[in-house]
Image (tube, helix red, strand yellow):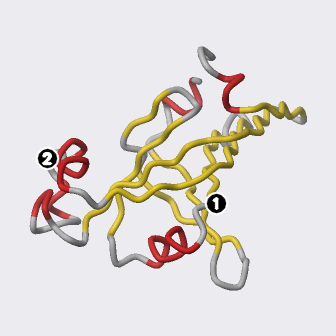
Amino acid sequence: MRLVETSRDAIVCSIDEEGYPNGKAMFRLRNDGLSTFWFSTNTSSIRIGQWLRNPKAAIYFLDAQDFHGLMLTGEMKIHMDEETKKAFWKQGDEMYYPLGPTDPDYSILEFTAIKGNYYHGLKKHLFLAEEAKGWS
């Protein structure tokens, strides 16, 4: 989907201990269509603890100029293993993770979408993530 591919960032949401949503802008590292998205974050971040307690998550992409929005809801998995971290490491990441891809404060997040809501103008389209395979 063009909205996702032209968005460098997404708002990524977790649920806190009291059941309230928490959102944060994060760089989108990679995605597989509209079903799976990868992000990186600090292992010490608040959201890692929230997703370890409750993997439910949402991500949101926005094109404010043309009034497009895409919300995907699903679950977040946290990868702290060296193999996954090295696979996603890129030049410049040392700015956030000074010890490199083996930095214990570097984690990879894998979001798997279950359903989505695409907004354009005043219309919305609800869908299951499996229906979105092959959309462009």
Q: Quadrant of the C terminus?
A: top right
Question: Which residue is painted at 48% across and 41% down in the image?
Answer: 37
Question: Which residue is painted at 79% across and 31% down in the image?
Answer: 127
Q: Are marks 1 and 2 in contact (CB under 8 Å)?
A: no
Left or right of 89? Residue 119 is: right
Residue 25 position within the rendered picture, expressed as x and y whole percent measured from the top left: 50, 59
Toward the viewer: 65 or 130? 130
Left or right of 20? Residue 42 is: left
Amino acid type, callout 1:
Lys
Question: Which residue is painted at 79% across and 36% down in the image?
Answer: 119
Amino acid type, callout 2:
Gln
Q: Please, is residue 1 above or below residue 80 in the view?
A: above
As drawn, the residue found furthest toward the left would be 99
Toward the viewer: 111 or 30? 111
Q: Please, is residue 127 above or below residue 101 in the view?
A: above
For numbered disc 2, what is the local secondary structure? loop
Q: Which residue is mark 2?
A: 91
Q: Which residue is mark 1?
A: 56
Q: Please, is residue 77 above or below residue 44 in the view?
A: above
As drawn, the residue found furthest toward the bottom would be 18
Residue 57 position within the rendered picture, expressed as x and y whole percent measured from the top left: 62, 58
Which is in the foreground here, disc 1 or disc 2? 1
Left or right of 96? Residue 16 is: right
What's the distance in space between the residues labelled 1 and 2, CA to CA? 31 Å
Q: Please, is residue 94 above or below residue 92 in the view?
A: below
Q: Quadrant of the N terminus?
A: top right
* Of callouts 1 and 2, the N-terminal one: 1
